[in-house]
Image (cartoon, rainbow, N blue to C red):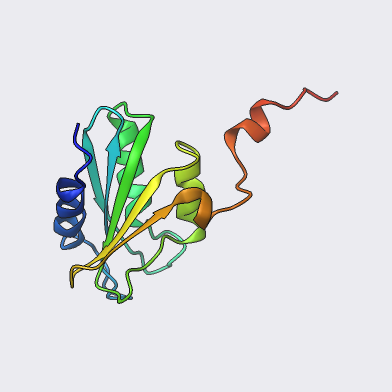
Amino acid sequence: MSDDPARLIEAALAVRLNAYAPYSHFLVGAAIEAEDGQIYAGCNVENVTFGLTRCAEQVAVARAVSEGARRFRRIAIATDADPPAVPCGMCRQVLVEFCEDLEILLVNTQGAIRRERLQALLPGAFRPADLLEREPRP
């Protein structure tokens, strides 16, 4: 397992081209790296009702989980935005479910790379431990 994020970034940029975004025209690709080094990619899939739209980060996580991954090292998120776009609040919460301080690589098609930590983007997150540590109530 390498610390070089090049493969992860390449996967996010490549899958971005598969995005289904006929309404916003905002193509997003995400590639998440599991602890074992396996990379799972996903793109955004819009829906005319918008509420049913799935963000690239959610698709990548769902793909990884469906293949048995549960712990992650980092995620690359690719757009054509300048500066690179950050994940929406819903995606931040989805990511914190599996890794409270994931490294996030925000990249764009112009070659910019911005590194963030999930804790910095979602301080005070509602975590799985917030429910699991609770005492049952009558």
Q: Locate residue 115: give its quadrant.
A: bottom left
How many numbered circles does the render carry?
A: 0
Q: Is residue 28 visible?
A: no
**Residue appearing at x 62%, y 31% in the figure:** 129
Q: Which of 124 and 22 is in front in this view?
A: 124
Instruction: Locate the C terminus by quadrant.
Output: top right
Q: Which of 28 and 36 is in front in this view?
A: 36
How far across and down, in percent of the image, does residue 45 sit? 30, 59
Residue 20 as seen in the image, left or right of residue 122: left
Above or below: residue 98 compared with residue 54: above
**Residue appearing at x 50%, y 39% in the figure:** 97
**Residue appearing at x 26%, y 73% in the figure:** 22
How far across and down, in percent of the image, does residue 11 sit? 16, 50
Residue 109 as seen in the image, left or right of residue 93: left
How far across and down, in percent of the image, does residue 121 sit? 50, 57
Above or below: residue 97 compared with residue 6: above
Residue 113 as seen in the image, left or right of residue 6: right
Above or below: residue 137 compared with residue 92: above
Above or below: residue 103 compared with residue 14: above
Residue placed furthest toward the right = 138
Instruction: Locate the N terminus by quadrant.
Output: top left
Q: Is residue 46 visible?
A: yes
**Residue appearing at x 27%, y 29% in the figure:** 67
How far across and down, in percent of the image, does residue 112 sit? 24, 68
